[in-house]
Amino acid sequence: MGFYQQYQMGQIVLPAFLFENINQLFASPEEFLVWQLVYLENVTKSTSLSIDRLSKRTGMSAETINRALNNLISTGSVQYQDTSKEDGKVGFYIDASPLFQRLDQLAEMSQAEDPETVNQKEFQELLKFFEENYGRMLSSIEIEDLQKLAQEVPLVLIQEAVREALLNGKTRWRYWQAIVRSWVQEGIQTKEQIQRRRDEWELKKTRQIKASDEFKNNVNLWRIEE
């Protein structure tokens, strides 16, 4: 799921990737501040903006705000909509969401440049796997957390750790991550290695049960002989 899709679904937490790429998205701190206020107006469902309101909130002059807005519009970070009415009442609406489309493009470029970055298609399948098994959409913070881990370990380890956690009735986010860390420490990297570990664990449990049964039988025999 891309940043723009998250925005459309109501995720209002700004992603860390945005802050990591401020210099590529905004020409000045003023632009970034104005965009954030426009974004705030959008998520609070305000129908219009005014230069005066933005000026009061930022302490910047109307000229500075107009320049910042024009730059944001020209770079495709925001979209301007005229909301003036027939009665002569002037108004406008600024949509902040196009910036997230630019952010998606940056993420794709970053992924193409970095061979170690997880394949986007595979990550989308991983997200779908999580959403199906957890029965809910992941939050922006969870998605970022998952993206970072997916760049460090094979995706199969994450999927199998989630399966193991859910089979144990554990749904906490940190539980399956602890399983992944344990496997990594053991040098496990593939599904075959995970299955071999499970088989060894099952065999160990079976031997423990058998030993316990033999002990009980010996105790019973000893009592009978008494």
Image: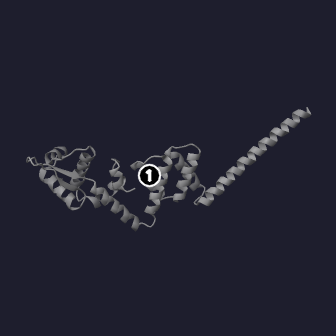
Residue 156 locus on image (x, y percent): 54, 58
Could you tell me which residue is drawn at 12 percent across and 53 percent down?
A: 63
Could you tell me which residue is drawn at 37 percent across and 57 percent down?
A: 2
Amino acid on which disc 1 is placed: Asp
Label 1 element class: helix
State the residue lying farthest toward the front: 86
Question: Which of 105 and 8 lies nearest the eye of the viewer?
Answer: 8
Residue 86 locus on image (x, y percent): 10, 49
Q: Residues within 10 Å of mark 1 (few under 14, many from 20)?
A: few
State the residue lying farthest toward the right: 225
Where residue 216 sits, quadrant-wise, is: top right
Left-right relation of 70 to 188: left
Residue 226 locus on image (x, y percent): 91, 31
Left-right relation of 202 to 173: right
Residue 225 locus on image (x, y percent): 91, 34
Could you tell me which residue is drawn at 53 percent across and 46 percent down?
A: 175
Relative vertical location of residue 54 with respect to residue 106 in this rendering, above or below: above
Circle 1 is placed at which residue position?
145
Where residue 184 sits, quadrant-wise, is: bottom right
Question: Which of 24 and 120 lies nearest the eye of the viewer?
Answer: 120
